[in-house]
Image (tube, helix red, strand yellow):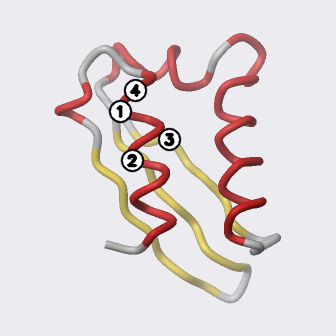
Amino acid sequence: MDKRLEIVEFIVKRLVEKPEAVEVSEQEDQDGIEVMVKVDPADVGHLIGKRGSTINAVRSLVTSLDGEENTKIEIVE
């Protein structure tokens, strides 16, 4: 597993109530890299956070560690 995916999975599993339901994958296109995070529907709110603050923090962390400006993180139920 890619280091970026390992980091996202590590963080997300600690933010949700059902870590066993977390699945992380990625795909690359001409716009950059998209990381898809699948969580239990009940955990979507935990991952997004108030006004998107939690998911924005995860995005910022991954971007700073990765050095890729075009990394996107998408939440999938």
Q: Along the line of sight, which residue is nearer the eye, 14 or 34?
A: 14
Kindly check if marks 2 and 1 are in contact, taking CB atoms under 8 A apart as contact. Answer: yes
Kindly check if marks 4 and 1 are in contact, taking CB atoms under 8 A apart as contact. Answer: yes
The numbered mark, 2 or 3, whose residue comes first in the sequence reads: 2
Q: Residues within 10 Å of mark 3 (few under 14, many from 20)?
A: some
Cα distance between the residues tagged 3 and 4: 15 Å
At x 68% / y 70%, what residue is drawn?
66
Q: Residues within 10 Å of mark 2 (few under 14, many from 20)?
A: some
For badge 3, the amino acid type reads Ile
Q: Quadrant of residue 18?
A: top left
For badge 4, the amino acid type reads Arg
User: Mark 3 or mark 4, which is nearer to you?
Assistant: 4
Q: Secondary structure at mark 4?
A: helix
Kindly check if marks 4 and 2 are in contact, taking CB atoms under 8 A apart as contact. Answer: no
Cα distance between the residues tagged 2 and 3: 12 Å
Cα distance between the residues tagged 4 and 1: 4 Å
Kindly check if marks 1 and 3 are in contact, taking CB atoms under 8 A apart as contact. Answer: no
For badge 1, the amino acid type reads Lys
The numbered mark, 4 or 2, whose residue comes first in the sequence reads: 2
The numbered mark, 3 or 4, whose residue comes first in the sequence reads: 4
- Return the residue at label 1: 13
- Return the residue at label 4: 14
Cα distance between the residues tagged 2 and 1: 6 Å
Q: Residue furthest left?
A: 20
